[in-house]
Amino acid sequence: MIENKVVLITGVSSGIGRETAQLLAERGARVFGTVRDLGRADPIAKVELLLMDVTDDKSIKDGAESVLENAGKIDILINNAGYSIAGGVGRDEHRGSAPVVRHEFLRRAACHSGCSAIDAPEWLRPHR
Ligand SMILES: NC(=O)c1ccc[n+]([C@@H]2O[C@H](COP(=O)([O-])OP(=O)(O)OC[C@H]3O[C@@H](n4cnc5c(N)ncnc54)[C@H](OP(=O)(O)O)[C@@H]3O)[C@@H](O)[C@H]2O)c1
């Protein structure tokens, strides 16, 4: 089922993103994984790494376009990058993290409504 599907997964430098990228590549998907620092990223077998900061619209667009140029499509987007916040988002220690919080919010909102088009960025819509 996953063979030859083109997967874009954000945040593959560690954790769930890294494990998922590895698993999908082992199962035959063509996997593009995003990192914020290509120089520090550990390679993952059969996973094509690319640069993306999910708080930066230009970086998202450039990264996605490079996948579309290379593979011609994105079948599956796994919007994984981010970090967990414990406690209220209005607390002082979370100041400055608004873009990531917004990203997380959109991701969660989309999944609560069945991962519908509300979280699909403009560049992805023609390829859904
Ligand atoms: N683990 C859990 O129990 C749990 C529970 C609920 C939700 N989640 C969510 O699941 C996702 C993965 O969690 P995890 O535990 O695997 O976390 P993790 O090991 O900390 O990995 C997070 C990944 O996201 C990347 N990332 C963070 N901010 C980014 C940004 N602005 N732009 C691009 N990449 C960014 C990190 O890259 P860098 O190396 O560059 O920082 C890293 O690759 C997160 O969104 C988290 O909120 C996790």
Image (cartoon, rainbow, N blue to C red):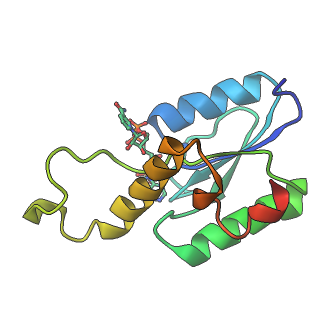
Q: Position of residue 65 (x, y in %)?
A: 77, 68
Q: Is residue 120 left or right of residue 54?
A: right
> Where on the picture, by quarter, is residue 31?
top right
Image height of 53 relative to 13, above or below: below
Image height of 28 relative to 119, above or below: above
Observer-nearest residue: 26 or 97? 97
Image height of 124 relative to 15, above or below: below
Q: Quadrant of ligand 1?
A: top left
Q: Position of residue 8 (x, y in %)?
A: 69, 48
> Where on the picture, by quarter, is residue 64?
bottom right
- Which residue shows up at 46% across the image and 38% down it? 14
- Which residue shows up at 63% across the image and 40% down it? 43
Q: Position of residue 2 (x, y in %)?
A: 81, 27
> Where on the picture, by quarter, is residue 93?
bottom left
- Which residue shows up at 14% across the image and 47% down it? 87
Q: Is residue 11 left or right of residue 22?
A: left
Q: Residue furthest front?
A: 113
Q: Residue furthest left?
A: 92
Count of numbered circles in the view: 0
Residue 57 in view (yes/no): yes
Q: Position of residue 45 (x, y in %)?
A: 71, 32
